[in-house]
Amino acid sequence: MSATLPDWAQQVGALRKKLGLKQVEFAERFGVTQPAVSRWETGEIEPSLEHYIRMGNMAPEPVCFWFWEKAGVDVNRIRNLLASNS
């Protein structure tokens, strides 16, 4: 990935690849088109807050926290809840 891409574009592309999904498969999970995913990954448009939350729900720890934090979620509270439940 190019160093000129926004951090969020790199993170979205890395998550999709980590999950082993093609852009069209990733798009289907979010109710968007493949070109929309392509624009996310090229830094042309940024995903919505809802999409960031859903990506966080799909991502493994600790990557999930990055996506949730990007959406404005209080990740420290989530970490505390997870720690208290383990």
Image (tube, grey):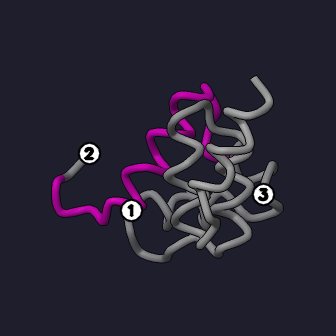
Residue 25 visible (yes or no): no
> Tag 1: residue type?
Thr
Image disc number at residue 51: none
Mark 2 and mark 3 lie on one chain; the one further toward the N terminus is: 2
Give the CA distance from mark 2 to mark 3.
Answer: 23 Å
- From the top left corner, tell me how far across and down residue 33 is, in percent: 72, 63
Asked whether 41 or 77 is in front, the reply is 77
Q: Answer whether residue 52 is magenta in the image.
A: no
Q: Helix or strand or loop: what does disc 1 sit on?
A: loop
> Tag 3: residue type?
Phe
**In this figure, which residue is indicated by the disc labeled 1?**
42
Mark 1 and mark 2 lie on one chain; the one further toward the N terminus is: 2
Q: Helix or strand or loop: what does disc 2 sit on?
A: loop
Give the CA distance from mark 3 to mark 1.
Answer: 17 Å
Q: Quadrant of residue 4?
A: bottom left
* Whether residue 30 is situated above or below residue 18 in the rendered picture: below
What residue is rendered at 50% in x and 64% in y? 40
Q: Residues within 10 Å of mark 3 (few under 14, many from 20)?
A: few
> Tag 2: residue type?
Met
**In this figure, which residue is indicated by the disc labeled 2?**
1
- From the top left corner, tell me how far across and down residue 47 is, in percent: 58, 70
**Which region shows up in magenta?**
3-25
Q: Answer whether residue 24 is magenta in the image.
A: yes
Residue 71 visible (yes or no): yes
Asked whether 37 or 51 is in front, the reply is 51
The quarter of the image holding the C terminus is: top right
**In this figure, which residue is indicated by the disc labeled 3?**
30
The quarter of the image holding the N terminus is: top left
Q: Helix or strand or loop: what does disc 3 sit on?
A: helix
25 with respect to 74 (left or right):
right
- From the top left corner, tell me how far across and down residue 27 is, in percent: 72, 53
What residue is rendered at 62% in x and 29% in y? 19
